Image (spheres, grey):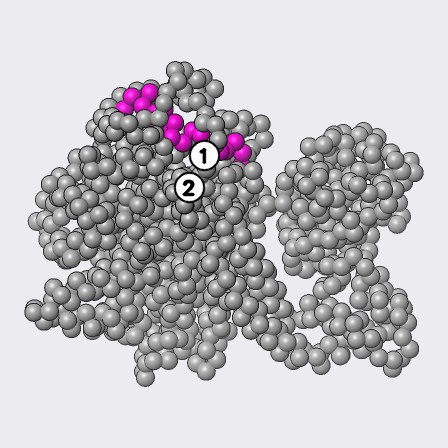
């Protein structure tokens, strides 16, 4: 019971101590009811109650951190998500909750938070695809709002009436468009991305906490980095000595790529000189891709340099084939490929620098070299607004050194796919380097070249700035210090993200146009086929409009919660019932119409609806009634007779039993292990997920970087949600493209694989094992079991786990390398005082227990 209520009302399991205290209280018949009521109240008072309730609301509200569709650009609506959590934690009356989300901007002396609430009706996808008519998109957004209102508040499939009068329910097509008139005069144009106003500039009070946490992380990792560098100093001094003779003989850090193959996609002619310079002649297509294939006499490659070289024979004496001498390089691609092979492995680019980049705001997105590895032809490196006769240089650093096999070549592809025609390169040179550290990340001479240029006599000390650069180069290649260096770099990138989020962000909200738009019935639902004109109105079969009332979104919200019709109350309590019992009293929560299922207990549904309204739309009051009922407290065990008579539990003859949603499983693992960071609100976080998911789906435009430090262990409600690639560890979530109020439950084997292999679960298992070992005098089995399942193991269960633990411990003692691997998952470090073999064995038991049917099921 303790576990059931905690999971239902907070989404997190209870602590063993709290379970023990409640069990003691419930064993006394005189205290049983008061103890249970107090325990339920305790769940409501937890700040995590709002997070649990918000997870349902975000799914229904089609909330996401991106726009959707092909571009799927990032948006910053996350302060609205925090508003929702706060509203549930404050137990804001549902009628006011509705009013502020519909019309917070129209209220007298509206606060920023009330305006923020209207982001609910801007959570729809926005379409910025080329060739799309903005007005068609704007109409789509209005239609989405009407359908969302129908699903979430009325439980009706009103969307059928977009094209024709509803065939089953009394919803006229004209009334559908009357309802749409309330949303038709929003001050929007149908644009997407940064043009999808209206916006509310909002500075979240919850973001600074993330900044402070990130600063602490940077400081901690800085100390770790410094300690690693200090330990590597003797090796660095030896490295300097080994390279002193080499430096005296001269150094060339960048070598030209002498191509064995030169290709143009569109048939231009490419020729290369002895010094690696490529000249382009012949056909001059609107767009082109150049490919250079070859080696540079290197064992590995760590970066690429492109020199754009002007020539008097080219237009304007520049380096490009355009009349103005302007080039646009939209993307670069690098592969390592075996000779003769059709495909190779992609090289991941980490950063780019150029000696000059045009202002992209002045030239339709073209200018910045940092946009040359996002697979987007609408941006890229360009030399507008400068003398075309000037040479230019850009360098790209690779994420990892790429080692070349004996038969492998480097394939460099220069993509020139700009929407502006004939801005291709005419003369250039590609160079490669094998040096790590500063060399592929700076435009000037490399540290080795600077050392050689200094021409120091033997015994003369190296100047401090140059010595620091040489040390950076050495450490970037030193296996012992690379992990600390990379962790420090990731922490700094994370801090930059949090600082950016702590500034004012633009949140999409509602705001009315000064001049209302006319609204028409759309013939067959087509956006460009207006029919008869209509005024704002409602579905009169549900409840009439009060005569004389003005018709704005304020009055629409009040009509939805008008006691003259109990439909909204019925739909709402049905959703609440679904949260606690797994299924609603109406098992088609999105359809209370003729084609939906009838309620299993109509009188109960009515009674709860009246309770909701008479309590002042007090959501917590209704949840309390449900959670303290005898029905809720039934055992989920079922007799053979009742399984035949009531297989789907429509009679509520037993407690509900169902698999916990994937987000709850992740949150439970974090909480059980003690890893969970309980902070409320703030910028989105990125939990661990398999590498390459975003890159594959977005063609490399977006790269997934897991959050660092304590932000990694935040609740799933804060996870960054990309519509084209929702969090990969969720298997039963809403797609968040349209409103969904009935979610599937997963039974896919992929979830079992995730629970056993995902980094979050592996790290949680190890940390849980550590804490059990630290608090247990002997075997950690019982402590692990009790933390995961909220009960002590039965003797036969304990015997099985103890046998597994002993066997694993023995095996890991004989295989110390495997023990080290087993405890090295995630960002947190294992306790060095614990035996690796013992910790690995305990981690195995933790993982096993976290994967038990009882652990992943709400009983």
Q: Residue at x 39, y 34 (%)?
A: 145
Considering only vertical position in the picture, is 31 above or below 757?
below
> Mark 1: which secondary structure?
loop
**Along the horizontal axis of the image, is 92 left or right of 194?**
left
| Residues at discs 2 and 1 in contact (Cβ within 8 Å) | yes
Residue topped by disc 1: 512
Q: Residue at x 91, y 36 (%)?
A: 313
Give the total of numbered labels: 2
The image quadrant where one finds the N terminus is bottom left
The x, y position of residue 539, in whole percent, is: 27, 27
Q: Mark 1 or mark 2, which is nearer the start of the sequence?
A: 2
Residue topped by disc 2: 105
Q: Quick check: is 505 in the magenta stretch?
A: no
The x, y position of residue 804, in whole percent, is: 32, 72
Q: Quick check: is 180 in the magenta stretch?
A: yes
For this orientation, the residue located farthest to the top is 532
Tell me which corner region of the image, top left, top right, bottom left or bottom right, holds residue 460: bottom right
- Near-viewer residue (7 or 780): 7
**Along the horizontal axis of the image, is 424 left or right of 618?**
right
């Amino acid at each position: 019971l303790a576990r059931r209520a905690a999971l239902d009302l907070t989404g997190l399991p209870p602590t063993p101590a709290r379970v023990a205290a409640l069990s003691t209280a419930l064993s006394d018949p005189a205290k049983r009811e008061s103890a249970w009521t107090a325990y339920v109240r305790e769940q409501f008072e937890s700040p995590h109650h709002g997070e649990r309730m918000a997870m349902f609301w975000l799914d229904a509200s089609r909330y996401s951190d991106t726009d959707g569709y092909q571009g799927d650009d990032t948006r910053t609506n996350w302060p609205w998500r925090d508003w929702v959590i706060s509203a549930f934690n404050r137990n804001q009356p549902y009628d006011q909750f509705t009013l502020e989300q519909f019309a917070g901007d129209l209220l007298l002396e509206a606060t920023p938070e009330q305006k923020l609430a209207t982001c609910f009706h801007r959570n729809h996808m926005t379409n910025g695809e080329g060739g799309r008519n903005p007005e068609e998109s704007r109409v789509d957004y209005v239609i989405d709002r009407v359908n969302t209102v129908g699903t979430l508040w009325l439980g009706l499939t009103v969307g059928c009436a977009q094209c024709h009068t509803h065939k089953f329910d009394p919803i006229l097509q004209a009334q559908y468009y009357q309802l749409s008139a309330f949303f038709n005069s929003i001050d929007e144009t149908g644009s997407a991305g940064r043009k999808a106003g209206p916006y509310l500039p909002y500075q979240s009070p919850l973001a600074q906490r993330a900044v402070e946490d990130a600063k602490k992380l940077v400081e901690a990792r800085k100390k770790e980095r410094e300690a690693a560098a200090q330990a590597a100093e003797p090796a660095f001094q030896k490295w300097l000595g080994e390279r002193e003779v080499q430096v005296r003989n001269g150094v060339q850090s960048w070598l030209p790529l002498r191509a064995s193959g030169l290709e143009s996609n569109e048939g231009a002619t490419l020729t290369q000189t002895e010094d690696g310079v490529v000249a382009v002649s012949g056909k001059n297509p609107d767009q082109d891709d150049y490919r250079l294939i070859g080696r540079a006499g290197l064992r590995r490659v760590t970066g690429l340099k492109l020199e754009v070289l002007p020539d008097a024979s080219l237009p304007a004496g520049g380096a490009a084939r355009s009349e103005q001498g302007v080039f646009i390089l939209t993307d670069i691609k690098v592969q390592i490929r075996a000779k003769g092979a059709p495909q190779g492995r992609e090289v991941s680019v980490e950063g780019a620098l150029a000696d000059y980049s045009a202002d992209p705001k002045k030239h339709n997105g073209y200018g910045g070299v940092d946009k040359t590895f996002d697979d987007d032809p609408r941006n890229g490196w360009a030399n507008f607004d400068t003398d075309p006769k000037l040479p230019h240089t850009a360098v790209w650093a690779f994420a990892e050194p790429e080692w070349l096999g004996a038969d492998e070549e480097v394939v460099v592809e220069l993509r020139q796919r700009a929407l502006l025609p004939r801005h291709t390169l005419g003369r250039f040179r590609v160079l490669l380097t094998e040096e790590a550290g500063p060399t592929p990340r700076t435009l000037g001479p490399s540290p080795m070249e600077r050392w050689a240029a200094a021409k120091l006599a033997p015994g003369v000390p190296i100047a401090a700035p140059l010595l620091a650069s040489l040390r950076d180069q050495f450490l970037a290649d030193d296996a012992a210090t690379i992990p600390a260096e990379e962790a420090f770099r990731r922490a700094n990138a994370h801090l930059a993200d949090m600082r950016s989020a702590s500034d004012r962000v633009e949140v999409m909200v509602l705001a009315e146009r000064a001049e209302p738009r006319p609204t028409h019935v759309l013939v067959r639902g087509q956006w460009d086929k207006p029919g008869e004109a209509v005024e704002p109105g409602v579905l009169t079969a549900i409840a009439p409009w009060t005569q004389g009332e003005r018709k704005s979104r304020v009055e629409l919200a009040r009509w939805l919660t008008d006691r003259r019709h109990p439909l909204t109350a019925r739909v709402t309590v049905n959703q609440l019932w679904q949260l606690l019992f797994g299924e609603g009293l109406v098992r088609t929560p999105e359809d209370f119409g003729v084609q939906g299922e009838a309620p299993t207990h109509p009188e109960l549904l009515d009674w709860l609806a009246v309770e909701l309204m008479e309590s002042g739309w007090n959501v917590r009051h209704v949840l309390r009634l449900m959670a303290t009922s005898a029905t809720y407290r039934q055992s989920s065990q079922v007799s053979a007779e009742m399984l035949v008579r009531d297989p789907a539990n429509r009679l509520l003859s037993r407690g509900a039993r169902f698999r916990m949603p994937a987000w709850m499983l992740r949150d439970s693992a974090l909480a059980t292990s003690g890893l969970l960071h309980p902070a409320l609100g703030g910028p989105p976080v990125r939990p661990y997920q398999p590498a390459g998911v975003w890159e594959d789906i977005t063609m490399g435009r977006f790269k997934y970087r897991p959050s660092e430090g304590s932000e990694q262990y935040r609740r799933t409600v804060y996870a960054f949600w990309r519509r084209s690639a929702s969090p990969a560890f969720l298997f039963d979530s809403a797609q968040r493209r349209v409103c969904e109020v009935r979610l599937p439950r997963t039974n896919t084997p992929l979830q079992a694989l995730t629970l056993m292999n995902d980094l979050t679960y592996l790290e949680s298992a190890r940390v849980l094992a550590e804490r059990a070992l630290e608090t247990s005098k002997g075997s950690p089995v019982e402590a692990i079991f009790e933390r995961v399942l909220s009960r002590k193991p039965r003797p036969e269960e304990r015997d099985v786990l103890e046998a597994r633990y002993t066997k694993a411990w023995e095996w890991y003692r004989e295989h110390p390398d495997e023990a080290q691997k087993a405890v090295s998952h995630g960002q947190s470090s294992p306790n060095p005082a614990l035996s690796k073999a013992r910790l690995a064995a305990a981690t195995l038991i933790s993982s096993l227990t976290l994967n038990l049917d009882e652990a992943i099921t709400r009983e």
